[in-house]
Amino acid sequence: MSLTTETTLRVVLYEGANAQPLEADNRLAALTALLEKGFAVTRAVAGGRVAPQPRGSLLVLGQFANGRTPAAEVVSAESPVRFEDITGFDADHIARTAEGVRAETGAAQHGEWKPWFPVIDYDRCTNCMQCLSFCLFGVYGVDQQNRIQAQNHDNCKTNCPACSRVCPEAAIMFPKYKSGPINGDAVQDSDLGKEKMKIDISALLGGDVYSALRQRSDAAKARFSKERDDKKALQERQKCLAKLANAGDIPAEVLMSLPSAQEIMRRAEEAKSKAAAALAAQPK
Amino acid sequence: MTKTTRILYCHCQYAQVLPPEVKAAVLRKLCESGVAFDAVADLCELSARQDPALQRLAEGGAVKIAACFPRAVKWLFHAAQADLPLEGAEVLNMRVQSADEVTAALFNGEVKPNLPRGKATATDAPKAVAAA
């Protein structure tokens, strides 16, 4: 099941009519515990309304009068609503209750995937397809109008911002990145200069980082076969990877997990073909 | 604040990019207040899931969002097919603003729309925390 079709469980902390509000400290502890488990929580107060949960279940927690949980007025098979009385529960107990309901309903488990993926700023994007051409992991694709989009978020390599480095417009953000403009901070003219410089660095490495990797890898292989020296081959690879990691700010573990040179070639060709097809389909 | 202004708080659970003391203080103030609000573990995750909750928030009128950079928040919502209203969304940036600044803006009566329009420039950047 994909990220966009998985069902989710949303929690409502109900403090409206017929429910005893939580003490502020208990509310904070409960909210914190639920958020740390990955839940989205709506705090509902008197007079407020809670919207239904179209793709999943709703868990309503409250200190209900006399411990009696109210009957749901509208419950559909598509968005079931469940009430739990939390009178006397501490924060851990509340979080465990929510976790139990999540498991029971088969809703998405949070925390298994760090949400790291490219977010495109379409105010800046020129649809040049460099990112699609560059990414070897199939994160990018195009929509029906041949507009670039991030499609396979969970293919993205955690902490790798390399595609944002090749974007000539600094249009690709990773909101969890450490610094701007990749983290979403405003783009300065000097940032555009930096991006260009990084592309030049990759050119110095031999056209692009992947062809550099290929060439280095082939050279190391040749040396290995001639000299039968494991240590030298490893040193060569490490030297190359360190250089590439610096150039593209690519985590070493991502580079170390790259497939064979042949597979890199195949994927690079595939990505380039997809980009070329999308560009060709754009209105002139 | 108008009665219909909603509040969304992002806990940025899966990264250590928000100063922990800032997000803890903002969440505490929210919990001490009498207001209704939505809190999400991680806005990025909701965006990747195209969670319908983001659509509801985007379509429901004025909203104040305590999260990170306005440019990132704008396009995270867009990626979830839930474009925020340019005239009715104010993003408070817990990466660079102090907890006091964020909570003051969350609870004041005015929505100050600050989503970037067109190419974001240095002038769109939120002000840095004032030196003590």
Image (tube, rainbow, N blue to C red):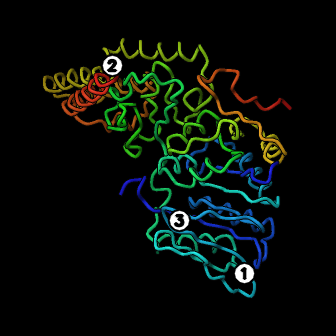
Q: Residue tagged by mark 1?
A: A64
Q: Depth check: give the residue in front, A91 or B2.
A: B2
Question: Residue A217 placed where, x, y %?
Answer: 24, 25
Q: Mark 3 or mark 1: name the one nearer the start of the chain.
A: 3
Q: Secondary structure at mark 3?
A: strand
Horizontally, is A173 left or right of A69 in the view? left
Answer with mark 1 or mark 2, whichever residue precedes in sequence. 1
Amino acid marked by disc 3:
Leu
Residue B14, given in percent of the width and then of the height, sits at 55, 49
Q: Earlier in the sequence, mark 3 or mark 2?
A: 3
Q: Residue B42 vs residue A1: left or right? A: right
Q: Is residue A123 left or right of residue B36?
A: left
Query: Residue at position x 78%, y 46% from top?
Result: B106
State which chain disc 1 sits on.
A
On screen, residue B69 above or below A55: above
Quickly name the residue at label 2. A208
Q: CA distance from mark 1 to mark 2?
A: 62 Å
How many neighbours does mark 3 have within 10 angstroms: few (below 14), some (14-19), or many (20 or more)?
A: many
Residue most toward the left?
A226
Q: Are marks 1 and 2 on the same chain?
A: yes
Q: Which mark is residue A9?
A: 3
